Each structure stands twice: as C-alpha cells, then as structure tokens.
Amino acid sequence: MMTDFKEFPEYDELHVISDIHMGGKPGFQILRETGRLAGYIAWVAQQAPDGKVALVLNGDVFDTLAEDIKGYVAIDDAVTTIHRIMKDDAFSGIWDALAEFVAQEGRTLVFVIGNHDIEMAFPTLQNLISWRLAGDDLVKKARIVFSTTGAGYTCTVGDAKVYCTHGNEVDAWNYNRYEDLAKVSRRLNADQPLDPKEWCPNAGTRMVKEVMNEIKKTYKWIDLLKPETTAAVGTLVVLDPSQASKITKLLSIVGEKSKGSQQVDQRLSAEGFKPHAELETTPLGLEQLLGPNLTAGVRAQQGHDAESVDDMLLNAEKNLHNPAALVATPEEALGTGELIWDRLTGWIRGVGKDEALRRALQDWLKNDKTFVIDDKDDTFKDVTAAAGSSIDFIVTGHTHLERAIDMGNNRFYFNCGTWIRLLRFTDAMLKDKASFKPVYDLLVDQQGRMELIDDAQFPDATGTKTSFVLNQTSAVSIKKEHGKVVGRLTHIEGDGKGQPKEIKAFARA
C-alpha cells in the first residue's frame, strides 16, 4: 500500500532566494548585504514554528568564477576553494545562519545548482557543505537537499505545485552541460584526474574568465551591469582597448553562444547532443558585435572619410572568421585582421572615450526592461514553455531581474532577482554627451570606485534624482493563508530580521 506516499515534499511555507554570489577576495566581492542575508535566514527559520518550512537557494549560491582557480571549473581545488569562501569573514556569518537553520525541526534547506556554482554537482563539495552545516549529525544532514542535475526542485504548498529552477537551463550563454558534470563526479569518486582540456566551458563562463575579470580589476562596476548580450563586446572594447587584441577570443565566445543555443534547443530531444565539432555557428557581423550606435559613431567621426570607414568595416567583417588573418605568429608582424582592429580601436578612441562608452551602453541596454517586474522576458517565455500545465507557481533566478507575472488559469511566475547590487542606467543619463558626462566621470575618470558609485544619484526623465545603484535584495515566498496559497515577491530590508516588504502578491483561488 502507498496511501501515504507523496511524489513531492509538502510544506506550509516556501521561501526562495537566488544569485547570492558568495565569492572573491576583498575588493572583488559583489555581495555586500551579508549581515542582512544572515538575518533573513534567521527570520525564515522562525516562520510557521509548528509547520514545515523550506528555504530554497535557487542557484549561484557561491561564485567560483570570482575565485582564483585553475581553468574554468574548480575540480581538484573545488573543496579548498569553497572552504575558503565559507571561512571568509565576509561570508562566514551566512554559513553560521544556515547551520542554525538546519538545526531546527521542520526546516529544509535546498541547494539548486546555477551557472556560477557548477561545482555543487560534485559529491565532494556536497559532502563539504553538509559537514559545514550539520557536522556528523545525521538528522540535520537529512534536512539538506541538493538539486544539481538540471531538474530543478519541485514541491507542494497546500494544493499548489511549485517548481524552482535557476533559469540558466534555457540561456544559451550560460547553460550547464550536466552530462559532463556527471562525468567529472564519476572521475572524482573513482579518484581519476580530469585533463582541463576535456572541459568545454559555456560562453558566459568564457566571457567572465577571459575578459570581464580582467576589466573588473579596474572597473569593478562591470559585474553590476545586466543583461549579457553580444553588444557587451563594444562596451568592453571601449573600456579597455587592449581587449581588441583578444578579439579572436571574443568571437569564439560568441560562436560558443551560438553552439549553446543549439545545445539548449536539443535538451528535450530524444536524439541527445551532437558532438561539439558538428555544431555549426552563424557568423556575426561587426555591427552586431560593436552595436549600431557605436558603429554609427565611428562613421560620423570620420565625416568625409565615411566611405573608407565602410570599406574598413567590411574588410574587418570578412576577416572576423578567418583565424589566419586575426592571429599573428611570433615570427610575423601584425596580421591583416589585427591591423584592421588596431585601426578600428584607434577610430573608436577618436570618437572620444566618453561618447564611445555612451553609445556602447545604449547598444547594450537597447529596449532594456530590467526593472519592469511584469515584463515577459526570454527566461519567462522559455521556462514557462518547458513547464507542464500542472505547475501552479514557477520560480526562477539567474537574470538578476525580479519578476512577478500572472500567467492566467490560476498560474503564476516569479523571478526572485538577486542579492548583489545592480546599476540603474536611465534614458535621461544616456541621452546625450552632456547628460552622460557626470556618469562617465564617476565610472571612468574616478576609476569606478564602488564607495562613490554606491552613494551616487542622477536625475531620471522627470528630473528627480534617483540612486544609481539599485540595492533591492529580493525574495519570493509561497504560503498557505486562510485556505488559499499566496505567492509574494518581496524586498528584504534593514537587518533582514523584520517582515519583508511586499512588492507583488498573487493569491491562488
């Protein structure tokens, strides 16, 4: 008899947060509200004292890409890397709060894998997390759940079925190769090494490790700018012209993104994955990489020489996908492609770095709906399309952009945002050279000092000064209330120990 069997865990309350990004040494850390997070964990632990409460950490709990690791994934050094994060004074209080959470009866702590903490799939790392939070106590360990195969986490609250997933599963920049992660786990359990050359990182990982981490050493704010698009290349080249010498890497990153798109499309295919070598990429034009505004600025800067600019751009585009032209051997002078790019970056500088950056940011943030909580972005469209009609609440993260959307038919979607800061560029700030100058001075001339950026305010379209940094630490809660199941998008404020501020609520009839 299976009359008492439940397919999925049942809770009275579910609380979900995402994109905490614990990682990096001082000066390289993007999570600031660590005390607030510890307070919030303690607050969740006190809810429904006689009931069942789950706290879901919905991906990117820690951030190994901000750590000094070998290659693109921490394998042999995964345990020492995460142990360092746990002991870091900036983050240790969070782990203490999580340990106190699992010490309480009726509490469940769920770790969902993201794209910045893929090492969580490894058994050795799961053992470390369990040991840090529960020691050798088997009862406490039983309250810790890992979801690291890309399946997400499904449970019920009242009569509602809830599905939590990070969201990178549908992102061609940042999808995880779970089959490869399983291979690494088998190697670790069998005490077999993994050649770093065997690991094929996704496009987002390569962009962070090969390009953005280097730029972040000078411009720490670059991590706080979303979303990631191909137009980011123009912004990165403007900020650091030396990145143009890495153009082959940037192009292969974009190509990897194209391959990732095909990989994502095949996730539900019975045929499985094609080998990487069989995946074809669609060449991108130069304007797609630099962005139309920046490209137009180069043309305008040359004025009467616009025709030769077009010729140069055409020649560059022809050489974009010709490795022989783009990479010079040590014995050779600059290749044709490198000469073209050297000239191009010179012309970009001729536009003026401030104007070039303004145009590049306009391209990056084109049609930006970052802070529109009911915007049906690509993550919403793709995740909801992949979820069955029996799911009543879908909760994602990954984009760092909070969302609360009524899907109709008594179904609801949330994105629980992030706990790191975000930069809020407005149309008024990017309108023209004059309006952008104080922004440029802050970001570049003052070398992007985060303490100054945190305090900065700029006028919006109405002339009202608003904070440049959006520091809204977000969470989603789903609870049984008065015979209904209510989902809420909330902001955690102060020390995190008080009632969260409700932003949007949906009650399931």
Image (cartoon, rainbow, N blue to C red):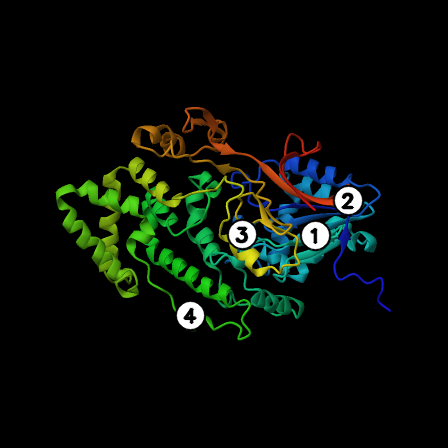
Residue beneath label 1, please? Answer: 110
The residue drawn where x is 33% and y is 39% is: 357
Q: Is residue 276 above or below residue 133?
A: below
- Marks 3 & 4, CB-CB < 8 Å contact: no
Name which residue type carries label 3: Phe
Q: Earlier in the sequence, mark 1 or mark 2?
A: 1
Q: Is residue 194 above or below residue 54?
A: below
Question: Which of 116 and 147 lies nearest the eye of the viewer?
Answer: 147
Mark 3 Cα within 10 Å, few/some/many (few <14, many 20+)?
many
The residue drawn where x is 43% and y is 48% is: 212
**Among the 4 quarters of the image, the one containing residue 38:** top right
Q: Position of residue 476 (x, y in %)?
A: 65, 43
How far apart are labels 4 and 1 at the CA level? 35 Å
| Residue 334 appears in the rendering | no
Q: Position of residue 121 (x, y in %)?
A: 63, 60
Residue farthest along the top direction in this orientation: 464
Residue beneath label 4, please? Answer: 279
Residue beneath label 2, please? Answer: 483
Mark 1 Cα within 10 Å, few/some/many (few <14, many 20+)?
some
Name which residue type carries label 1: Val
Please identify, in this view, whether the residue under mark 3 or under mark 2 is nearer the observer: 2
The residue drawn where x is 24% and y is 57% is: 316
Q: Earlier in the sequence, mark 3 or mark 2?
A: 3
Please identify, in this view, whether the residue under mark 1 or under mark 2 is nearer the observer: 2
Name which residue type carries label 2: Gly
